[in-house]
Amino acid sequence: MNYTIPTVDWSLVLPFALVALTGIVALIIETAHPKRDNGLIIGVSLTGLAATFVLLLTQLVLPPARTFGNMVLRDQFSVLLQLICVAATAVCFMFSDGYLREKKIAFGEFYPLTLWALSGAMVMVSTDNLLMLFVGLEILSIALYCLAGMSRSEARSEESALKYFLLGAFASAFLLYGIAFLFGASGSMSLPDIQKAVTGLTRDTLPMPVFGVMLVLVGLGFKASLVPFHQWTPDVYQGAPTNVTAFMAAVSKVAAFGALARVLVAAAPLHQYWFEALYWIAIATMCIGNLVALVQKDVKRALGYSSIAHAGYLLVALLAYTRDPDKVSLGTTVFYLIGYAAMTVGAFAVVSLAAKGDRDGSRYQDLHGLYRRAPFATVMLVLFLSSLIGIPPTVGFFGKQLIFLDALRTGLVPLAIVLAVNSAVSAYYYLQIMVAAFVSEEGAARPVSRKPGAGMTIGVCVCAAGVIFASLLGGYVQETTRTAALQAKPVPGRVQNQMEVINR
Amino acid sequence: MLLPIATMVTEIPISWYLGLGLVMFCLGGVGVVVRRNPVVVFMCIELMLNAVNLTFLTFAAYGIYPGLNKATAYQSAMNGQMMVIFVMAVAAAEVAVGLGIIMAIFRLRNDVDVDDMSSLKN
Amino acid sequence: MSASEIGFLALALLAVIGAAGVVLIDNPVRSALCLVLNFFVLGFIYFTLGAPMIGITQIMVYAGAIMVLFLFVIMMLKRQGAMAKPDKPDSRLGLAVVLGLALAVTVYATVIAPQGVTLPLGIKDYGTPQAVGVSLFTNFVWPFEVVSVLLLVGIVGSIMLAKRRI
């Protein structure tokens, strides 16, 4: 049998390999010194993440490339998303130790599992092959199922893990069935091939890719927590340990939207079949996320609904891009993801300070007196929450402004209006959280809990820097992803003629 | 003994295989909705994954995409077949973790029922 | 009706009986055994599609390893009384069956039926162990490597969830 071994450009997979290997080293340290102080593991993990970050920065200027038989794709879009994921993970590691110790679940396995979950997210965003996308998604998900159930003495944590696991496996069955039909319609797993195949369709072959795209959107919509598939989000965000929630909120969302962007670009020839559906899903996601958050009494749960609402905003950015890729850049989505990761990880980091003993202490009244105990962190919480609302000098404001303008530019005026109204509505529950942190604890049932450690302070500062200074990157992100987006530009038209034949 | 089965390859229309896959997928989906024991729910999900595998392999063997030719036919059949192998690998890892979660929850509550889980509320 | 059609229908009938058993039987052990039947028959159906390697893997991995794991956990939970409650499909069954049937009929009519009587390509030897192995180590070597991380996650994760001392 004849075969050729494909040539390999190792530099493309080096970031992934570095993260996965750091995870293995961290696990070996844990095995060699079980039940010790996790300081060494954290140090090694952070060093590995820093090296990966620098490596990715050097790749940011390189031209798009593929390797391993087109299984790996590196372009500016994928490098930027990987940078966000790596930075978010590093911040999660910085504040994890104190929190895990407080809850007495300081397992050394947390660090390798999280690193591998990160490597899954990196695989997911740096490919345009559905096989790799699926494998990456499953690495991320399976690691997150375990991490969500990490607090084993807490029923909430275990239940959230089970719920996440069953619904996640159910959703990935739908994703796979969709991939099967896209494969049937195109004979390939690669998104550019699928895009080519679905441009020349007849009446008999058309329903298959349409059905396939819909099922894939169900599967990815679950990961991105878009509305009909969002039920798991508040439960899992509330039940999982707070540092895991922070990781999940940032990295999982970035990976899901990276994959969603690539799938939607490939499905552009079928634009007319999915656009209307996603349009209403975006509206429902923004409204339901914010409205249900108004009546919550638990900070983590409220932030879970807020993350649903933010998924809605991000979907608006994606829809504007797919509607008119010439006028609008994919950079809006990337920029908003940078801001979202910074503010949400920061907010969860500060909320994790309220944990006391085996209780997560995430109800609003548990935050009372936080200002007295950790004044710096509380001020930072105010910063993160104002960014989530979208108050001017923060990245949240500039991100929302970009999405708003994109929507107007592409004629999606109703979406722009819904977005603006929702931002105003959301201020109410974010302000409630802020107020709770400043109320003094009267008749305190809870003794003063731990002071924020150095890791927490550094992590919060990194997030704060992201929230304040990321807006300076706005122009750069828009420009780089504009050139990157040219590589994978959707090809509209052509199908239109085919459609007329079919409707006749 | 397997040879007679392998020789019946040629004559069955694609819609029979796809139909079988669809029936299994929908049965699995119904099972996920109506059953309450998490182990059984998980078995129904496995059923759905197998329906997907059958669909992949059917498309690999039949090649119904436009622009099919001799040069691409082998590669595309290989694509479908490889996906099945990776789905199996993923399913194996998922089973290990999933049953681990179910065991952990049982240790805590001595009871497993999807509908009884209510500690995650306000 | 030709012999091969009768053969396929017999296998398909067994597979559907197995699948229906998983959903409808309220004893989890019997459900699991029905699933074994389904997976086993599916292995033979893979043979008819010209993929013997996948067929054998299906029988060994799914019908063998994975189902043993399932049965093991069911027995263990049962012994400790976790599965005493009867798990009868409840009132949602009627609605779910109607919805599932509607979905199946719609999808069949719109997506599958238009494919008509397309016959297989009869590609030679694409499903032999040799072909699978070569493919796995040339074009698909990267996903093959990445899956190793996935298995590592499976091992470490399930140990973290199941180890006795917290």
Image (spheres, grey):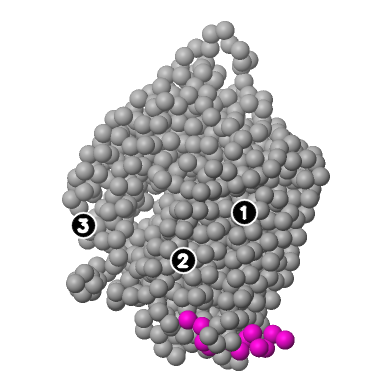
**Mark 3 = which residue?**
A327
Taking the spot 58% from the left edge, 79% from the top edge, the residue there is C8
Residue A186, percent from left and from top:
40, 75
Q: Which residue is drawn at 28% across and 39% down?
A: A419
Please name the residue that numbered disc 1 is placed on: C24
Gap in angstroms between the C-alphas marked 1 and 3 = 54 Å
Taking the magenta stretch, the answer to whether it contains residue A225 is no
- What secondary structure is found at the residue carrying circle 3? loop
Question: Is B13 on the left or on the right of A154, as rendered?
Answer: left
Q: Which residue is drawn at 31% across and 29% down?
A: A425
- Few, some or many residues within 10 Å of mark 2 (<14, 14–19, 20+): many
> Would residue A74 be visible to someone looking at this image?
no
In primary-sequence order, the first of circles 3 and 2 is 2
Is residue A365 found left or right of B68 in the rendered image?
A: right
Residue C129 position, x and y percent, is 66, 82
Q: Which residue lies furthest to the top in this view?
A: A443
What type is the residue that disc 2 sits on? Answer: Ile
Region rendered in magenta: B1-13
Q: Determine crowd level at label 3: few under 14, some 14-19, many 20+ residues with C-alpha closer than 10 A.
A: few
Taking depth in this image into account, of C26 and A92 the one nearest to the observer is C26
